[in-house]
C-alpha cells in the first residue's frame, strides 16, 4: 500500500506531537541510606542535600533519607543499588576498590593531614577518572567523595601506647583490604562486622576493640562499652555518596549536573559539621569516664608503611602527592 507524501507528513507530525507530549525523563526518587544516626553530620548533610536537590530540580528529583541502617548495612545498600534499586548510600571509598582498586587510596593510612587536602584530591581529574571507571564496572555512580566523617581512633578496654599493645586484640573494622591490612599492620586482629552490631559485640565480649571517628563514637554510644579512646587518627574517613547507575540514568542531564554540584556542596557542609562536632564528641566521651589519650604516632606510622606496597597503591600515593603539590 502506497502512502502519499501528504499523509506521510501528517504521520510524522503526529508522531512528533506525541513525542513532545511525553517527558524525556520521568520524576526520579532516590532513597539514600546511612548506618549513622540522624544527628550525625552525615545525616544532617543528607537532609540538606534532600532539601536543596528538590528545590533546585523543582521536584523532578526527590530524595528520601533513611538513617540508622533502616535500609540495611552499607554493603547491603550498595548491593541494592547495583541490582538496579533506586538506592544510594554514603560509603567509605575502600568498599568500592573491589571494582576499581585505585579508589582504595582514599582510605590509606596517614595519607591526608587535613580535610581540605582530601576535598582537593576528590575533585581532581585523576580521581574523577576512577569514578567514571566505577560506573562502568559496578553499576554505581559516585556523586561526590568529599563527605568527611573524621579521624578514626582506637576504642579499647586497655590503654594503648604503641602497636605492640594491640597484639591479640580483636578489633572491628571495615571489611575492605585497605582497612584490614592497616589494622593488621598496627598489631590488632581485624574483625569485619556490620556497624549496627558493634555495640552489642563489645558489650558481650565478642569484640575486644573497635575503631571509629568521634561523632560515630557518641552517635552509637560506644563510650558505654569501652574504657579507652586512643587518638591515632590512623585513617581520615573520607566517604562518598553513591547511587544506582540505573536510577541515575533516568535523571535529565541538566538535573544530573545540579545533583552532582549539590552533593559536593552538601559534603562540605557535613564535613564542616564533622570538624566542629568532633571535638565536642570527644569531650562528651571523656565526661562519661572513658580515658581519651593522645599518643606518639611515629610507631604507628612506621608500622603501616608497608600497606601501600602490599596493596599496590604506591603509584596512587604518588598521584595524591602530585595533586596536592607535596
Image (cartoon, grey):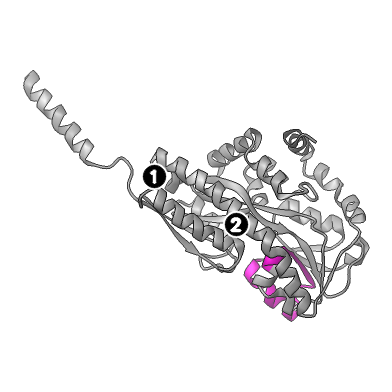
Seen from the viewer's position, the closer of residues 255 and 137 is 255
Residue at image coords 16%, 27%: 12
Where residue 117 appears, x then y in whole percent? 72, 44
Using residue 115 as the reference point, say whether residue 254 is left or right of it. Answer: left
Residue 234: image quadrant is bottom right
Q: Please name the residue that numbered disc 1 is placed on.
A: 250
Nearest-to-viewer mark from 1 and 2: 2
Relative vertical location of residue 273 with respect to residue 209 in this rendering, above or below: above
Seen from the viewer's position, the closer of residues 223 and 280 is 280
Q: Please name the residue that numbered disc 2 is placed on.
A: 270
Relative vertical location of residue 193 with respect to residue 94 in this rendering, above or below: below
Using residue 58 as the reference point, say whether residue 313 is left or right of it. Answer: right
Using residue 8 as the reference point, say whether residue 241 is left or right of it. Answer: right
Residue at image coords 51%, 44%: 261
Magenta stretch: includes residue 205: yes
Residue at image coords 10%, 27%: 10
Where residue 103 appears, x then y in whole percent? 67, 43
For the residue labelled by badge 2, is the local secondary structure a helix, a strand or a loop?
helix
For this orientation, the residue located farthest to the top is: 5
* Residue 1 in view (yes/no): no
* Residue 297 in view (yes/no): yes
Q: How many marks?
A: 2
Where residue 222 appears, x then y in whole percent? 71, 74
Relative vertical location of residue 154 with respect to residue 317 in this rendering, above or below: below
Seen from the viewer's position, the closer of residues 277 and 166 is 277
Residues shaded magenta: 194-216
Amino acid at each position: 500500500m502506497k502512502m502519499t507524501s501528504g499523509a506521510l507528513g501528517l504521520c510524522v507530525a503526529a508522531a512528533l506531537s506525541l513525542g513532545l507530549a511525553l517527558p524525556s525523563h520521568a520524576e526520579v526518587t532516590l532513597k539514600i541510606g546511612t548506618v549513622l544516626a540522624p544527628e550525625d553530620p552525615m545525616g544532617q548533610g543528607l537532609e540538606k542535600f534532600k532539601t536543596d536537590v528538590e528545590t533546585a530540580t523543582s521536584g523532578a528529583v526527590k530524595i528520601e533519607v533513611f538513617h540508622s541502617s533502616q535500609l540495611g548495612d552499607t554493603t547491603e545498600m550498595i548491593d541494592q543499588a547495583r541490582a538496579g534499586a533506586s538506592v544510594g548510600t554514603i560509603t567509605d571509598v575502600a568498599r568500592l576498590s573491589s571494582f576499581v582498586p585505585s579508589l582504595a587510596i582514599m582510605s590509606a593510612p596517614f595519607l591526608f593531614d587535613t580535610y581540605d587536602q582530601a576535598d582537593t584530591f576528590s575533585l581532581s581529574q585523576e580521581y574523577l577518572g576512577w569514578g567514571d571507571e566505577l560506573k562502568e564496572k559496578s553499576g554505581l555512580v559516585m556523586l561526590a567523595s568529599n563527605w568527611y566523617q573524621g579521624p578514626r581512633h582506637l576504642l579499647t578496654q586497655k590503654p594503648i601506647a604503641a602497636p605492640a599493645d594491640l597484639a591479640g586484640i580483636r578489633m572491628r573494622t571495615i571489611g575492605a583490604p585497605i582497612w584490614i591490612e592497616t589494622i593488621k599492620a598496627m598489631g590488632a586482629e581485624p574483625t569485619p562486622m556490620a556497624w549496627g552490631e558493634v555495640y552489642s559485640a563489645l558489650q558481650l565480649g565478642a569484640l575486644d576493640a573497635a575503631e571509629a571517628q568521634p561523632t560515630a563514637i557518641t552517635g552509637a554510644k560506644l563510650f558505654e562499652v569501652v574504657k579507652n579512646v586512643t587518638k591515632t587518627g590512623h585513617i581520615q574517613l573520607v566517604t562518598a555518596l553513591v547511587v544506582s547507575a540505573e536510577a541515575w540514568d533516568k535523571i535529565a542531564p541538566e538535573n544530573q549536573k545540579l545533583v552532582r554540584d549539590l552533593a559536593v556542596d552538601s559534603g562540605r557542609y557535613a564535613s564542616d559539621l564533622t570538624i566542629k562536632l568532633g571535638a565536642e564528641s570527644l569531650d562528651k566521651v571523656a565526661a562519661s569516664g572513658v580515658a581519651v589519650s593522645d599518643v606518639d604516632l611515629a610507631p604507628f606510622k612506621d608500622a603501616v608503611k608497608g600497606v601501600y606496597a602490599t596493596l599496590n597503591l604506591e603509584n596512587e600515593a604518588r598521584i595524591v602527592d602530585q595533586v596536592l603539590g607535596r
